[in-house]
Amino acid sequence: MSVSKKYPEYAERFTLPQRSVLSVEYPGYVEDAEKAIKSLGGREKLSRDVSQGVGAQLELRYRYDDPTSHPIKGEIVPTHNVLIKVTRRIRRPKGAPKDSPGETVGSSAKIVGVIEKTARFRKLADFQYILPKGDPLFDLANVVQNIDIDEAKKFIDSNVLDSTATAQNTYIPAPFLDSSGWPSRFSLNMFEKPSDQPGNDTGEARTNMGAQPNIFHGTYMRYSDKTVPTEPSAEALENAKDVPQDIMAKARAIIEKDPVVSRNAMEVMMPPEERGGIRTHTIMSTLAYVMDKGPWRSCWIRFGYDPRKDKDACKYQVLDYRRNAGGTTSRKMRLARQGDASQTAAASENAGSAAGPLQAGLYILDHETIRQGIAGIFQLQHVKLPTVVELLNYSEGRRKIPSEKSGWLHLSVLKTIRSTVHDIKKAIENEPDKQSFDMSVDYETLDKLIEADRRQENAVLATEERIREREEGVLLGQASQVVRDRIDAQVNEFMSQLGTQTQRDMAGADTLDGDRFDSDEGEFDIFDDESDGMNSDADGADGF
């Protein structure tokens, strides 16, 4: 009996079209598409906002012809959707109107384009009310919006505001109460009264308005602390209680995948348009803590996770990659010789901006990042340079315990990583058209440096072990067995140097020497039952 093998029937495959489509999630029922586009500022403004890329701010005004209308803020977010056109075939009786119900005889679907960007309006509308068109403030708003200098001068010279403004016919425009559009906690405090302070030599008094403090409810810890925080503070939980659950779920998934995430990487993986303008530290303060210094500084560390006890945490260490603020002279000269003035200006502008939009959008350090002149703090796992990846996976470069300066890596390995990145940077500046650079590492020399670091590490560990044993002996009132053995070995070595250890084998030893040995033996036996163990341990430990 033959059994026919049935294979699963897969759906038909289609090639996605190259057409890119913009999707607008309009907050309302659209009956007239042209009016909806005008409420977004018109086709030209919408096209200009979309061309700015992801994160561009949009403004929606339902009363687009009213300059006093408060806009609803929106943004452009990246999406990976497709636009599908569905066609239904309906059979109707002859002579029946088109909107009459009929029998559906078939349907078809066709992919029209790919939705790479979506305009979303998920923020709250601000308080506002309508001004009558005859009000002078309405005319003034029109003049300001159109930037008409001549009309503005005429308006000021006419004194129309002073002549027509009365308590009965003047409408005060509604103020802009919120710029973010998201609900947030507001600490209502009494405004600090300005204080006059003595001025400089001119005798003029200076007014101190009192700056508002930047409150941070996160959890800090020192690198030298023995334990790590396991839960957030009550202030952090209270401050983040209004954060939407979907935003918290995404942040929790990120920190669960990698227990240590740099602040820059968190800003990229959770851009402002996704977290609704909520500050990152408001969200992350409930999930992670911050270390003040060391190899994991400037990172969010998951509560309860101690990178000092996990050897794999070396990949989470940070690499502070810096560059010259003004760029290099050789690159500017080379661009000038090529005659590309626009490229020279762009390079100078990019090199001079320490925190440009390009920096904020990247947390991967590779050849392209270095070529674009981006600098910042990167995690070693995000460094995609082959030589650095090889050094990071080099097992001989790991320490037994982490250090505050180099983490789980020996200092020589960390210095080699930094010098490799510096050499790649120089090579890219000299050959900007070359795509990749392979830097070789002299592992024979590196192994010698690692061996020197290892000896230094062992010496530090031995010293710490002796201190720990000595403290243990003092706390217990008696020396530990390790300390006792070490003291006995030192005593035997000292006696051997004096020549008294082999007294029985020595010929011609007089009785006086034997008596002296017998009398001194009791003094060196510092662990006798009748002796004070704690004092003897302290006296014996002074010799090393």
Image: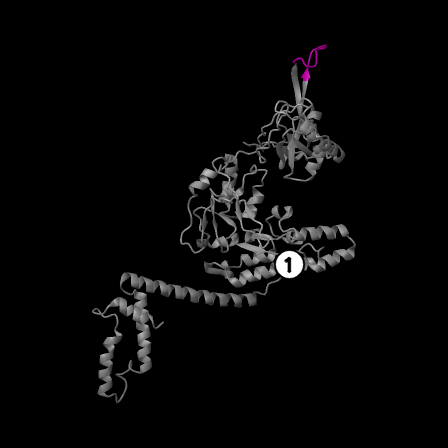
**Vertical arrangement, residue 469 with respect to residue 436, above or below:** below
Give the camera-side residue of 474 and 253. Answer: 474
**The residue stretch that appears in magenta:** 90-101
Give the camera-side residue of 69 and 102. Answer: 69
Q: Quadrant of residue 45?
A: top right
Most extreme residue toward the right, as rendered?
A: 339
Q: Name the residue tied to disc 1.
A: 424
Q: Quadrant of residue 237?
A: top left
Q: Amino acid at mark 1?
A: Ile
Q: Secondary structure at mark 1?
A: helix
Which residue is drawn at the image coordinates 58% and 41% (left, top)?
Answer: 271
Is 311 on the left-hand or right-hand side of 33?
Answer: left
**Vertical arrangement, residue 194 with respect to residue 97, above or below:** below
Q: Does the magenta portion include 202?
A: no
Is 539 on the left-hand or right-hand side of 261?
Answer: left
Rendering coords of residue 132 (x, y %): 66, 23
Give the camera-side residue of 482 and 544. Answer: 544
Q: Is residue 36 visible?
A: no
